[in-house]
Image (cartoon, rainbow, N blue to C red):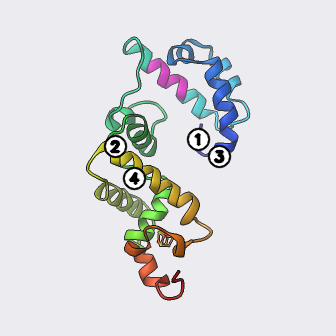
């Protein structure tokens, strides 16, 4: 639900959806029209179709259905891209798995590679390489690291502004060193 949609719009819908469909089996066995109906208001209905395809795939493969924790296995499921696979592996299973969404990409490139544009194909690949290279050693630490990365991008190092003087990573940030160290000193 959070793909392309803000948390504030998702929260109520998420609770309602879980109330209607408390298990993957319930999603898998439902008529597609009911799933779509529960999704109404969120838009991007391909996500609802993919969710049901995902549920049907997992239910077919065993009972009770379980979402895998391995990013490679997650990528094989309908509607799961690199970011979602990394997020599920890291946040639900505490795997040592990188993730790059728009916010994380902005922070990673500003800190480690200010000349890289993550919106280009090569830049996107490079950003994933950085994300992999800076992971902590354990899955539990990776969980915290990934949460922090996303929070930094959402609250401190945003697309509109950079709160460099308050930023906890400014001492290692290339962008800060290049453009801000003198002019924005706290
Ligand atoms: S120091 Fe500034 S540019 Fe660097 S990550 Fe923090 S807010 Fe972003």
Relative to 15, residue 116 above or below: below
User: Residue 2: which disc?
Assistant: 1
Nearer the N terminus, badge 4 or badge 1? Answer: 1
Quadrant location, the N terminus: top right
Kindly identify the residue that appears in the image at 42 percent across and 63 percent down.
Answer: 108
| Residue 115 can be seen, yes or no | no
Kindly identify the residue that appears in the image at 49 percent across and 63 percent down.
Answer: 106
Relative to 151, residue 52 above or below: above
Disc 3 from disc 4: Cα separation: 22 Å
The residue indicated by pointer 4 is 145
Disc 1 from disc 2: Cα separation: 23 Å
On whether ligand 1 comes within 8 Å of the CB at mark 2, the answer is: no
- Left or right, residue 158 beside residue 57: right
Query: Depth check: 173 or 46 in front?
Result: 173
| Image-quadrant location for residue 149 | bottom left
Q: Residue furthest right?
A: 41
What SS does tag 4 mark? helix
Query: Depth check: 19 or 141 in front?
Result: 141
Disc 2 from disc 3: Cα separation: 26 Å
The residue indicated by pointer 3 is 6
Nearer the N terminus, badge 4 or badge 2? Answer: 2
Q: Could you say where residue 157 lies in the image, as x and y percent from the top left? A: 54, 66
């Amino acid at each position: 639900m959070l793909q392309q949609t803000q948390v504030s719009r998702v929260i109520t819908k998420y609770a309602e959806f879980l109330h209607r469909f408390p298990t993957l089996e319930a999603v898998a066995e439902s008529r597609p029209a009911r799933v779509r109906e529960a999704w109404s208001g969120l838009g991007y209905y391909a996500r609802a179709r993919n969710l049901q395809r995902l549920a049907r795939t997992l239910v077919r493969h065993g009972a009770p259905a379980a979402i895998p924790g391995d990013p490679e296995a997650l990528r094989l499921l309908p509607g799961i891209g690199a970011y979602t696979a990394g997020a599920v592996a890291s946040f639900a299973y505490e795997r040592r798995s990188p993730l790059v969404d728009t916010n994380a990409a902005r922070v990673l490139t500003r800190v480690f590679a200010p000349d890289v544009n993550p919106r280009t194909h090569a830049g996107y690949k490079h950003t994933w390489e950085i994300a992999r290279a800076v992971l902590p050693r354990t899955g539990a630490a990776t969980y915290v690291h990934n949460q922090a990365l996303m929070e930094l991008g959402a609250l401190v190092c945003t697309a509109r502004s950079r709160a460099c003087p308050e930023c906890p990573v400014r001492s290692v940030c290339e962008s800060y060193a290049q453009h801000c160290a003198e002019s924005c000193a706290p």
